[in-house]
């Protein structure tokens, strides 16, 4: 999952402390946990869900773990671990004689490296200050932001303070041509601030830490989206606050950021289509293939990758039986590359579909997108993307269908006597580009860096028992984006049940008599 929310600065310390405290306990307990279901659980009554077995899922995860072990411990893009992951998926689908049509979709990502240390000068009341650049954050006044563009200002440019932490378009009015200074924090990510900033025609973007705790004084290492077009730096609290005060009386700055030309590197999405079904009514089922550089990414997002592989091959096998009620709609299973740097793979796919002319590849051939990311979190919840919280600006055509998908997952967990929670539909995973293009979307996930509440733990304890209830006050995935996101970072019961839910949803939609009418009651966009 892609996430770099600004508030991590404030809560990060608490979270990491909790993670460290609970992780040992969690892992010890998981040794003894098997994926056995509780007695109260209802029959699945879904042929596809009934094919989902934890052993099949874990077999794929063992392969992904092996790939990470052989590749410096991660599967991030532009590494051998990522390439091997993509090859593994491709070869597995090819070799299974599944009757799926498998395709690679290659695109380019801009490589990024500084040619030399960036320079930031301010001119305040006739006095020039040369800020200290360092990657040693403790003594650094500023650092670069990954995916910043290069810049060399010939003259000093006036600095303007962005009000309200810069999370809404209103915060970015009347700042064109200036250098924007914006504080860390708020409900949006740095990348989202960067998108609003780019739309406001500023010359450069300066973030600064908020200084609310002793851990929020230094500059923060972060990144913008891979396709960002703005120069950007990150200042310490002290440097940023001094500049913010001076901005009120006309401070100006000069920036120099020089990048090495490293060109681009290729990454692949993989999609596998059912041969059966109407290609002009396609169901897209996605998960992402890359990990963050910090770790093997077995829960994030190996668990989604494996879930999607099992869904694809099990559906294809059911199609080969005489009794299964095949779908009227084509299903396209996709493994998106480069989710962790800003949904690059899914964005590329949607952009390509918007201009495609081949029947079945056009955006208008897509009925919906189901997304599965982080499916086995150790301190899991059964989280359902809640269409009511769809990010502002979502086209209205996507809303009725997204709401139907939310409700069908909710009803499934209720029928199964399983607990469930809604989760924000904030566009921060690979369904985001589909939703933004007006396509109905949804999915289920077991959670990342949110904290399980006491009330949630009690609800889960009542319904799935003490062993599966997890810990209140602990992060849902204590190894989120860390090196410990390994095979032991998977809750077997949570994982199996989540993927069964995912399977049920796909089958329900696939076997709907009039999916188009169901998702788009006033017509498709
Ligand atoms: C990954 O594969 C691409 C081709 O798809 C190749 O150009 C690149 O060098 C490979 N990267 C690594 C690190 O192996
Ligand atoms: C920027 O991010 C990319 C992708 O995560 C990574 O490969 C690269 O090393 C980063 N560059 C710098 C200079 O941190
Ligand atoms: C600012 O400091 C950098 C790094 O020490 C140096 O290369 C640069 O020449 C200095 N610029 C000015 C105007 O003092
Ligand atoms: C981009 O800026 C224009 C005004 O220049 C505004 O109308 C529009 O809503 C902004 N778009 C976004 C996505 O913020
Ligand atoms: C700049 O100079 C003005 C007038 O001389 C003074 O009021 C102001 O405080 C100075 N500002 C800074 C940031 O030093
Ligand atoms: C599907 O439902 C829509 C909207 O309710 C309706 O307009 C359309 O005629 C239906 N199509 C079929 C084939 O039943
Ligand atoms: C893992 O990938 C899936 C599918 O792309 C995505 O929905 C999910 O958000 C990713 N994980 C997280 C926590 O984003």
Image (cartoon, rainbow, N blue to C red):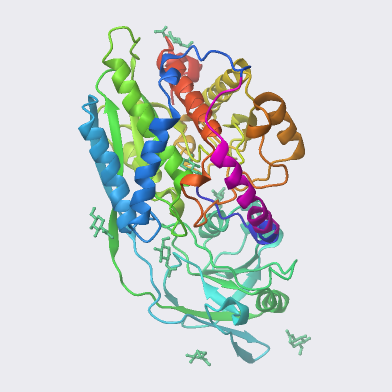
Q: Give the residue displayed 68% in from the left and 61% down from the top.
A: 13
Asked if the magenta segment contains residue 478, the reply would be no
- In this picture, residue 393 sits left or right of residue 366: right
The secondary structure that most of the magenta stretch takes on is helix
When asked about the image quadrant of residue 249, the answer is bottom right
Q: Give the residue displayed 47% in from the left and 35% down from the top.
A: 372
Judge by depth and name the residue closer to the eye, 322 or 230: 322
Judge by depth and name the residue closer to the eye, 101 or 20: 20
Q: Give the residue displayed 63% in from the left and 19% down from the top.
A: 417
Q: Position of residue 129 (x, y in %)?
A: 61, 88
Q: Position of residue 240 (x, y in %)?
A: 66, 74
Residue 360 visible somewhere in the drawing: no
Above or below, 25 relative to 155: above
Above or below, 342 relative to 278: below
Q: Position of residue 505 (x, y in %)?
A: 48, 21
Q: Quadrant of the C terminus?
A: top left
Q: Farthest front residue?
A: 32
Q: Which residues are magenta?
A: 14-38
Q: Give the residue displayed 45% in from the left and 40% down from the top.
A: 303
Q: Farthest top residue?
A: 323
Asked if the magenta segment contains residue 30, the reply would be yes
When asked about the image quadrant of residue 412, the answer is top right
């Amino acid at each position: 999952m892609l996430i770099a929310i600004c508030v991590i600065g404030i809560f990060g310390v608490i979270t990491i402390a909790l993670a460290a405290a609970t992780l040992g306990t969690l892992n010890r307990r998981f040794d003894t946990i098997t994926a056995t279901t509780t007695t109260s659980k209802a029959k699945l009554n879904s042929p596809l869900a009934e094919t989902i077995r934890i052993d099949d899922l874990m077999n794929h995860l063992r392969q992904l773990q092996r790939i990470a072990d052989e590749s410096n411990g991660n599967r991030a893009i532009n590494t051998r671990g990522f390439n091997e992951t993509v090859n593994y998926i491709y070869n597995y689908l090819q070799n299974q004689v599944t009757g799926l049509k498998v395709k690679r979709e290659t695109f380019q990502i801009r490589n990024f490296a500084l040619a030399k240390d960036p320079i930031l000068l301010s001119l305040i009341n006739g006095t020039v200050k040369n800020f200290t650049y360092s990657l040693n954050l403790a003594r650094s006044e500023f650092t670069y932001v990954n995916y910043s563009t290069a810049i060399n200002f010939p003259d000093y440019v006036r600095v303007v303070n962005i009000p309200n932490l810069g999370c809404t378009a209103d915060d970015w009015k009347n700042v064109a041509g200036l250098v924007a200074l914006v504080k860390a924090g708020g409900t949006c990510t740095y990348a989202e601030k960067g998108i609003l900033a780019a739309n406001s025609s500023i010359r450069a973007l300066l973030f600064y830490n908020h200084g609310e705790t002793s851990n929020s004084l230094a500059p923060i290492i972060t990144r913008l989206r891979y396709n960002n077009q703005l120069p950007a730096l990150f200042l310490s609290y002290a440097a940023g606050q001094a500049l913010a005060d001076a901005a009120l009386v006309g401070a100006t700055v000069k920036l120099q950021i020089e990048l090495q030309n490293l060109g681009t590197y290729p990454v692949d999405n993989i999609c596998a289509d059912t041969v059966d079904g109407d290609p002009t009514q396609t169901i897209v089922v996605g998960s992402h293939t890359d990990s963050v550089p910090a770790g093997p990414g077995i829960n994030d997002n190996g668990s989604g990758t494996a879930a999607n592989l099992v869904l694809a091959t099990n559906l294809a096998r059911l199609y080969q039986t005489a009794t299964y009620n095949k779908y009227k709609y084509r299903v396209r299973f996709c493994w998106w590359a480069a989710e962790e740097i800003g949904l690059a793979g899914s964005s590329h796919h949607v952009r390509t579909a918007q201009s495609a002319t081949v029947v079945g590849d056009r955006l208008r051939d897509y009925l919906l997108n189901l997304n599965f990311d982080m499916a086995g979190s150790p301190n899991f919840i059964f989280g359902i993307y809640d269409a009511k919280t769809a990010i502002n600006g979502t086209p209205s055509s996507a809303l009725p269908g997204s709401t139907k998908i939310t409700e069908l997952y909710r009803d499934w967990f209720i029928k199964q006597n399983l607990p469930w929670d809604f989760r924000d539909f904030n566009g921060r995973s690979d369904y985001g580009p589909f939703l933004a293009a007006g396509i109905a979307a949804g999915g289920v996930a077991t959670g990342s860096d949110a904290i399980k509440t006491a009330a949630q733990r009690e609800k889960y304890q009542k319904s799935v028992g003490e062993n599966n209830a997890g810990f209140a006050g602990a992060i849902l995935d204590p190894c989120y984006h860390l090196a410990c996101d390994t095979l032991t970072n998977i809750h077997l019961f949570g994982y199996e049940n989540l993927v069964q839910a995912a399977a049920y949803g796909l089958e329900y939609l696939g076997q709907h008599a009039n999916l188009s009418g169901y998702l788009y009651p006033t017509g498709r966009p």
